[in-house]
Amino acid sequence: METALGYFLMSWLDPYLLVLVAVGTLSGIYIGAIPGLSVTMAVSILISFTYAWDTNEALALMVGIYMGGVYGGSRTAILLNIPGAPAAIATALDGYPLAKLGEAGRAIGVTTVVSFVGGFVGILALALAAPLVAEISLLFAPRDYMLLGIMGLLLVASLADESLVKGIVAGAIGILISMVGLDTMSAQPRLTFGSSQLLGGVSYVAVMIGMFGIAEALVQLHTIGAPVVKQQVDRIVPSLATVLRHLPLTLRASAIGVWIGALPGAGGDIAALMAYDHAKKSVKKPSRPFGQGAYEGLVAPEAANNAAVGGAFIPMLTLGIPGDAVTAVIIAALFIHGLRPGPNLMVDTPHLFWFTVGNLTLANLFMLVFGLLGIRIFAKIVEVPKAILLPVVVVLSVVGAYAINNNLADVWWAVGFGILGYVLRIYGYQLGPVVLGVILGPIVEANFRRTMIGVRESWTGFALELVSHPITLLLLLGIVLSVLRGTPLWPRLVAKLSRAS
Amino acid sequence: MTAKRPRHPGELGLTLLLVAAVFVVGREAYRISGFAGPSSPGFGPLAMVAVVLAGLLVELVRLALARPAEREPLAVRARRFAAAVLPPPVLGAIALLVLYLIGLELLGFVIASFLFLAIAIGLLLHERPPLVRVLLALAVAAGTVASIRLLFQELFQVLLP
């Protein structure tokens, strides 16, 4: 217990780590607050700068960016009706009407406090549940990891945006990219087209920097001429009475956030939308009608999306399965630092778990402080014209891609993926599924092959494996339910079941 | 449901290009281990090629159903394509990006990045008066390159190109 506390307080007591968490949180809030600059972009570019660093330092920075970024996305959702991150989509529904009523400052203040409470609930859930989940997951066989990977890939459905088919194509392209190079099981070259340069595979990070950094900058050029919106904010610290009035809803929404965030394949965006829906159904007398500036419509999604951060770390650290695109990128970062997220992470490097919990708590505190104090400065920074911002993003992407192996070839890869990503984005293929495919493809493939070897390549044996073990069967049911939930059959099934009961 | 979405300019061309690329990748995937067992190294790549191909075929059907009733003249279609997919700022940025990478190899990070930033910012700030534009572009370019060098090379110890 004492050792765990020591690891938890590591960043609190080390001035350098403390500064890194603070800088990460501050940058996360700033990047999240700029429309077009996503948290995923920030983490992708920054990973490459942390190669030469100690793992603890890299983690301290990244955790700060993630926590700050999820919160920062709400700023533009409220002020400009442009969610800075997908997790802030639901925030715009009532946040922007509040800004139009002249209550932007108060809305941001309330958002900051409930995000802090939500973030804290998420971290508490992580600290309590992750050791338990890790213990159970030690019983997992390759087939279970394969199913968990497939569960993660189902996130494609929520990242696909305009077309599920395009989402699936994008995910499969990502998996194909991950297969380039020497096969880890047979050492046979795959998809290298005879090039020895491709034997080492395509760097994850080059793909991410290209797709989230360069492609995003190119997409943003379409709106380069749009005028910068001046932002006006007034008093922001909410009264205690306001906070207390919304506390029950905040806690309920946080619980939803933790639960959804912890499910592989569902992240902060879904959590926020579900919490918003819960608020609409459960709050009988909102401060204003929902959609017209109800504080309840702001409180629920913001508490939920920050609670989902802690929740998303549960499958990420214990099973190695990401909850959303950002956690997918963080998993890649852990790999780069020689760590294998999964049940063994808790066994081999238990200090890392408590260190991460400590960093998240610290980042949550910084978020509250920076959120309440720095709003006027942020309002100015966000007004920097895109004509200046975008070329700087490109240069940072180039520096980041070069830092992977100190090789210009990686920069060319990043730019190539950037242009490919731009074209795909323009035609409605979302890039989140590509990255998800790159990360989860190897997990699913390797474990599928191991299972197949175990049953001597018999499909009947494979099917029996899936239904004859309790944990596997539960996971399989989870997948079937997730797929069903996305089909038109689901509402009918729910209605039928509720009638029957 | 999918047929209701309109066709983006050039979408059919991109889908056909992707189909062609999938065939090339498919041939390479087949060369790994042919249609051997499911645990063979070539099974995964072939399976993913099949998934991409199936998805693209569904898209092709949708695009065929979403065909506009009247075919527009080529010049109009080319204009719509340029506006929606490759507007001048994007086309210029891609060209500048490629030149930047060549410049990195020839001139090194500091000079190439300074030139890239100054030109890109100068071009993108076209609404400002010429003098302000030039001064701002030079100042931001110099400041950014100096900050990156100081922050990343000196503080974070990241090697620059």
Image (cartoon, rainbow, N blue to C red):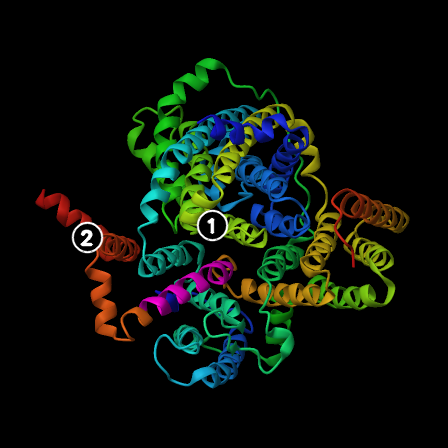
Foreground of the two, B127 or A296: A296
* Residue under label 2: A492
Residue A63 placed where, x, y %?
56, 39
The chain to which mark 2 is attached is: A
Amino acid type of disc 1? Pro
Residue A86, visible in the rendered structure = yes
Cα separation, mark 2 vs mark 1, equals 39 Å
Q: Nearer the viewer, mark 2 or mark 1?
A: 1
In which quadrant will I find the N terminus of chain A? top left
Amino acid type of disc 2? Arg
Q: Element type at marker 2?
A: helix
Residue B149 placed where, x, y %?
81, 48
Main secondary structure of the magenta stretch: helix
* Residue under label 1: A341
- Asked if the stretch drawn in magenta spans residue A437, the answer is yes
Label 2 Cα crowd, 10 Å radius (few <14 / some 14-19 / many 20+): few
Relative to B92, is B28 above or below?
below
Relative to A150, is A114 above or below?
above
Residue B10 image label: none
Q: Give the residues drawn in magenta, as a range.
A: A434-451
B95 sits to left or right of A488: right
In which quadrant will I find the C terminus of chain A? top left
- Asked if the stretch drawn in magenta spans residue A205, the answer is no
Of the numbered discs 2 and 1, the one sitting upstream in the chain is 1
The chain to which mark 1 is attached is: A
Label 1 Cα crowd, 10 Å radius (few <14 / some 14-19 / many 20+): many
Foreground of the two, A127 or A435: A127
